[in-house]
Amino acid sequence: MSQALYEDLKLDANQTRVLVLQPCRKDKDPIVCYLEIVDLTSGSSSINFEALSYVWGNLSDRRDIQIGPHVVAVTLNLEKALRCLRGRKRSRRLWVDAVSINQNDIPERNYQVKLMSSIYRDAKKVLVWLGESDKDIERTVKWMRRSLSPGFFDVSIAKGTNDSKWHSKTDSPKDIPASNPVTNWFRRSLLCGSGEIATTDIKSDHGMQKLLENPYWQRMWTCQEFALASWDPIVICGRSSFEASYLWPALHAKGLLQDMSMLWTEDGIINNGFTSNFPNIQTSILIRHAMDNRGLLPYRLEPSLGLFLSMTCARECIDPKDKIYALYGLVQHQDTLPAADYEKSTETIVKETLSFLINERDEVDVYSFLGTFSKSDKVSFSSWVPNLSDGSLRSAKCPAHFISREICSHGGFRFGGAQDQHNGRVSPDLTTLVVHGIQIDRLQKIFVLGNNLSQLRTQIIEIQELLKHNQSINRRELSMVKTSENQRPIAELINKPGVQNLWTTLAPRFDDNHGIKDMDSLPVQFEKFLGTSDIVDGVYPGMRASPALVQALEHMFGRSFFITEQGIFGVSVPDVQDGDELALLYGFKVPYILRRSPEYLGAHSEPFLMVGGAYVSGVMLGELAAVEGLSSRMKALKII
């Protein structure tokens, strides 16, 4: 009887397996290795291994390697990594998830999730494999090493002065006012690690773009692996390699860092709501340096599961359960989290996680960046369970595009006199979410927005005329009604200025991302867009508007524009219907559309279904913060 590939681990002894990669004489020689059990608590001599961080790649494209007496098929990307990493004279000890863990042993997989933080922190090196190199990448690596200073921050505060100094290899030190490190330093430097870098050789652009678009930065598990490394990870592209700390100054030098000033409150606390909007490589670097306060960081980032869910919502994984489990190693006090169990259904795991976040942590930010399921998804999940597999900002179900800085600064929708109110509660049987909120109005008119600029332009013109008509009617009605604010319906307290606010509703993040002084104002941009007929002199709708507006409008493709019975308007998910109810939920960062469950119509306490998030004109800029008496109008809303 042949020896089994995997010898059982003692799951109560912090054991794992290391792949010992044997040396070779020629690159084409077969890959030969064996597995060795190591005890992560036994001391440094046993923990003498490097941890490989990589993406599995195409699961159907496999190559054979030899592990002991066994021939094992691994993915092509892993085979290439092992072939590149093996030496000529000495063996190499690697922790490689695909072979170090028995992927067919569920109890072992559950336990290894708990060890991930120890494995990547204790490894003597973390090797980031991005695949094979080419001339563009080699040129970029040479440029980084020649021109840049590695590091997230290279900042010194001059004693007795109020100036910060930073430098690069190509510049003399620069003086930057730092009287307010959040509003001045960070907003001016965009969290630059090494300061202003001289204009670089354009030949390196293609290589930088390839590094930026590498699938490594799109995957769930790699985020944790990159962040946990105790020492600077080594990024490997074929025979080219460099320290990961070169990435931040390289991104800055190329103008590829997205403005992160929207993250900060004035006391330096990170607002979760915007974190899903940053490129994955930028998010990976931010998590790595912020969670353990590496470098000089004048802000506070608590490494919570809710925060990291928001920062990684657009990442991909084979098993949707790993949207959650792949973050466990980043979170302090893992023993407080629901135990990892791959035998449970995805719905149960998500419900348990939400119960933990909402009941124990009072966090509901997950509803700011993940949409709910629709009928087309053909799942029987509870309506309040978010779709972890659809975190793309391009998704018409994703509410992250609607988040406003003003609502974030208040910690979500909060109403005077209710500051100690819990954001919600998940029932012990995981069937119901109970939140407190204010029901605003019913939806009456729905426009499903088109999927191209020409259709969208026609619809906007129609919506514009309808809003002008509604605005004149509302003015006549309000002039005839004299009531106090406490007596008026909530919908009447919301300012409905009409057409002008239509622009910010259709392009809610225009100012955040494109606030450039010499750019035309948003109304002017819309007039250019709407003033262009279908085709004039070969110019299509949108071509005379700025690329910034076109990009903003593309986020509206496939969504629904709605108008309520009282004339409130906004944008939501494709699934909204006439009769759905608009509500502001306490602690949530976007309004939500709810639907009365048809199975319980007429019941004493009718539960709701959660349809999706929305952007609502007249409430997104904190307009209701000064309205008194709103807390008394909150109700407990049961969502199933």
Image (cartoon, rainbow, N blue to C red):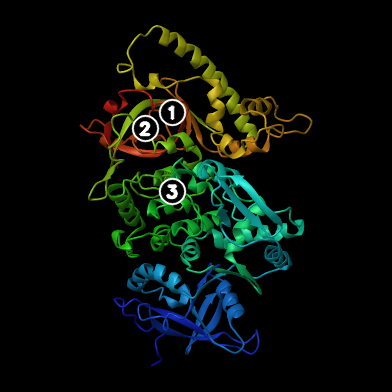
Q: Is residue 573 left or right of residue 439?
A: right
* Residue placed under numbered mark 3 in the picture: 377
Q: Secondary structure at mark 3?
A: helix
Residue 218, percent from left and from top = 54, 58
Q: Is residue 89 left or right of residue 95?
A: right
Question: Which amino acid type is marked by label 1?
Answer: Val
Q: Earlier in the sequence, mark 2 or mark 3?
A: 3
Position above or below: 16 against 568: below
Residue 101, percent from left and from top = 41, 75
Pick the front one: 316 or 419: 419
Residue 308, percent from left and from top = 43, 54
* Residue placed under numbered mark 1 in the picture: 619
Q: Secondary structure at mark 2?
A: strand
* Residue placed under numbered mark 2 in the picture: 584
Q: CA distance from mark 2 to mark 3?
A: 26 Å
Residue at position x 61%, y 60% from top?
247
Nearer to us: label 1 or label 3: 1
Position above or below: 92 against 129: below
Q: Please tell me how crowded label 2 is: few (under 14), some (14-19), or many (20+) other residues with Cα within 10 Å.
A: many
Question: Which amino acid type is marked by label 3?
Answer: Asp
Q: Earlier in the sequence, mark 1 or mark 3?
A: 3
Q: CA distance from mark 1 to mark 3?
A: 31 Å
Q: Secondary structure at mark 1?
A: loop
Does the CB distance between marks 1 and 2 fall below 8 Å? yes
Nearer to us: label 2 or label 3: 2
Q: Please tell me how crowded label 1 is: few (under 14), some (14-19), or many (20+) other residues with Cα within 10 Å.
A: many
